[in-house]
Image (cartoon, rainbow, N blue to C red):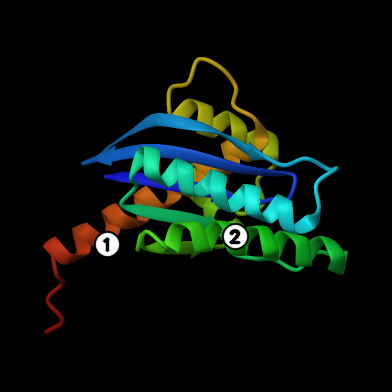
Amino acid sequence: MIILGIDPGLRNTGFGVIKSERNLIAYISSGIVSTTNNDTHAERLKDIFIGVREIVAKYTPEYAVMEKVFVNSNPKTTLALGQARGASLTAIALEKIPILELSSNEIKKSIVGNGHATKTQMQFMVKSLLCLNTEVCQDASDALASAITLSHRLKLMHHDQQNPRNNC
């Protein structure tokens, strides 16, 4: 199955696409949807929406995942992040792709084994897990980490459905 991870941001929205089959995950693509500081806020949100729609059309994911919203110390930043998330979520939802949201701690724990891992630790593990030869940018790495975490979660859900526990 193809999984799309999104790391939303008003300046750069990271994306990561992986393929998950059985116990294997494979890197397909990653990058960022960039906006221009000179554009209006509405134009930037439009660019994110269009960019994510193009990614969805190109890779036709079966699932999408995004980090849950967190409250930042700066309300203006939190609002901008929420709007970027909304543009991304809408682009994905229009294609009727199931979207899951995971907490930052859940993603970090899944990738590094520690819910308070650093960005450097996360990038290193994403690169290792996907057998990448080169670094990917931070936003794309975060999106790939979300996709890998969802892959693990879906495998566990599928395993539980295949092997129901006897509750007698």
Residue 155's spot in the image, x, y percent? 27, 53
- Residue at 78% x, 56% y: name it: 41
Q: Nearer the viewer, residue 89 or 138?
A: 89
The residue mark sitting in front, 2 or 1, is: 2
Other residues around mark 2 within 10 Å, as few (<14) / some (14–19) / many (≥20) = many
Image position of 139 (left or right of 133): right
Residue 80, labelled with which disc?
A: none
Residue 87, labelled with which disc?
A: 2
Q: Secondary structure at mark 1?
A: helix
Image position of 98 (left or right of 126): left
Residue 17's spot in the image, x, y percent? 43, 38
- Residue at 31% x, 56% y: name it: 154
Image position of 60 (left or right of 126): left
What is the CA distance from the residue labelled 2 to the residue labelled 1?
Answer: 29 Å
Report which quarter residue 119 is drawn in.
top right
- Residue at 26% x, 45% y: name it: 1
Q: Is 2 drawn above or below residue 94 in the view shown?
A: above
Disc on the earlier residue, 2 or 1? 2
Seen from this angle, which residue lies furthest bottom? 168
In this rendering, does residue 148 appear at all?
no
Asked if disc 2 and disc 1 are in contact, CB closer than 8 Å, the reply is: no
Residue 168's spot in the image, x, y percent? 11, 84
* Amino acid found under the numbered disc labelled 2: Ala
Q: Nearer the viewer, residue 68 or 82?
A: 82
In this rendering, does residue 51 appear at all?
yes
Q: Nearer the viewer, residue 88 or 47?
A: 47
Residue 101's spot in the image, x, y percent? 50, 63
- Residue at 64% x, 30% y: name it: 137
Tag 1 residue: 157
